[in-house]
Amino acid sequence: MTQLGTLEDLPQDYRDAMAQAGVAPLWPMMRNVLPHGAPQPVSKPGFWEYRALRPLLMRAGELTPVEKAERRVLVLSDPGRGAGAMMATPAIYVGMQLLLPGETAPAHKHTPSAARIIVEGKGGYTVVDGEKLPMEEGDLVLTPGGDWHDHGHDGTEPVIWLDALDLPLFVYLEGSYAIEAPLQAQRNRPDASQVEYLSSGLAPTRKLGAQTRRYPMMRYPWARTEAALRQMAAYGGQSPAELDFVNPETGTSVLPTMGFTAMMLAKGEKISPPLTSSAAVFHVIRGKGASTIDGQTVQWGEKDTFSAPTFAPIDHIAEEDSFLIRVHDRPLQEKLGFYEERSR
Ligand code: GTQ
């Protein structure tokens, strides 16, 4: 590999003339934008303990009425970019949202897609394009880009959930915006996970040429996910037991850019997955264990969240039977044609 020329190699009058003309030489910057062999992430592994986040979120509940926040959220910032960074990985934003009993968060729709993982509380719900989606702990609830959504709370205790959005992509593309509206009218029926898609492997019969909705199922109830993971752990013959959340009509990822994968690690199970080009945010539904990511070890427990940059070596060990949801950008990378795995 040859050593490329630097800016300092060039005479000052030439550098000034280039700046004047609004151009710059590629070669001094070449390795910044095209490093050899593998990306050089700016992102660093993040760890957000729920016991540290929760009091801060509850305080936001006292300090800022929901009317003043529209969405009362604390954003989990990538440590590589510092506090205030509106991303946990280059393509994934995550935030912890609080809704207090009786509160509503008004309807809006926006270009980025969102999904929520319910962390705590009973009685919360999201209405997505008129469909009321109950939020129970561990549920995955989708809000695809362009769909109206508002949040409400019929319970008596605070409700907290983790938002995952592909917001950073839309900001980068200068394509991010929202439209606001009053609360939506709700269709008076159970959500599609309890009607059309009650059972995996069964989908509604349709007349020839009838269209399906692009996002037919918006809620993935946790009880079913956990039962499926337990059966996979017992009989699936793969370590770890992992299941991707998929669109029940197409079998593809639930949202265009973000993937969601549920994982069970049995007590004592130790795994070192292949290195991958996709970055990830892990949320612990239940359990206890430790993960070493890029040489940094985090001791995690229930409701904690942590992240891994692209190609970071990751080792997990479970101290109890543990259930995690991994949010990642593999669907985006596959669409762009560069998703990659490397053995360790
Ligand atoms: O609940 O609609 O964390 O629009 C960020 C932007 C949540 C939401 C976020 C949003 C929402």
Image (tube, rainbow, N blue to C red):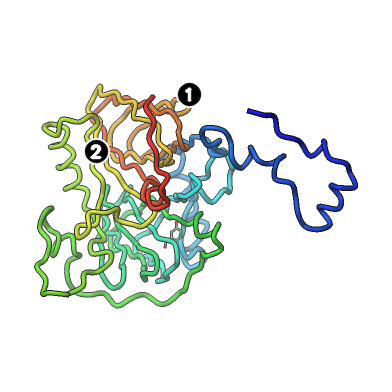
Say which residue appears at 39% left-offset and 65% top-offset.
145
- Toward the viewer: 215 or 53? 215
Q: Earlier in the sequence, mark 2 or mark 1?
A: 2
- Toward the viewer: 21 or 58? 21
Which quadrant of the structure image shows residue 308? top left
Q: In the picture shown, does residue 291 fall above or below 94?
A: above
Question: Whole-percent x and y of residue 179?
Answer: 47, 73
Q: Quadrant of ligand 1?
A: bottom left
Question: Whole-percent x and y of residue 126?
Answer: 31, 64
Say which residue appears at 32% left-offset and 37% top-offset.
302
Q: In the picture shown, does residue 245 fall above or below 127?
A: above
Question: Whole-percent x and y of residue 340?
Answer: 39, 38
- Toward the viewer: 150 or 277? 277
Name the residue beneath numbered marker 2.
242
Say which residue appears at 84% left-offset and 57% top-offset.
20
The secondary element bearing badge 1 is classed as loop
Which quadrant of the structure image shows residue 81? top right
Q: Is residue 301 left or right of residue 246?
A: right
Q: Residue furthest front?
A: 2
Name the residue beneath numbered marker 1.
295
Which part of the image, by quadrant, shows the C terminus? top left
Disc count in the image?
A: 2
Looking at the rendered structure, the kind of residue marked 1 is Gly
* Crowding at mark 1 (Cα within 10 Å: few <14, some 14-19, many 20+): few
For the question of whether residue 159 can be seen, the reply is yes
Question: Whole-percent x and y of residue 4?
Answer: 71, 34
Looking at the rendered structure, the kind of residue marked 2 is Glu
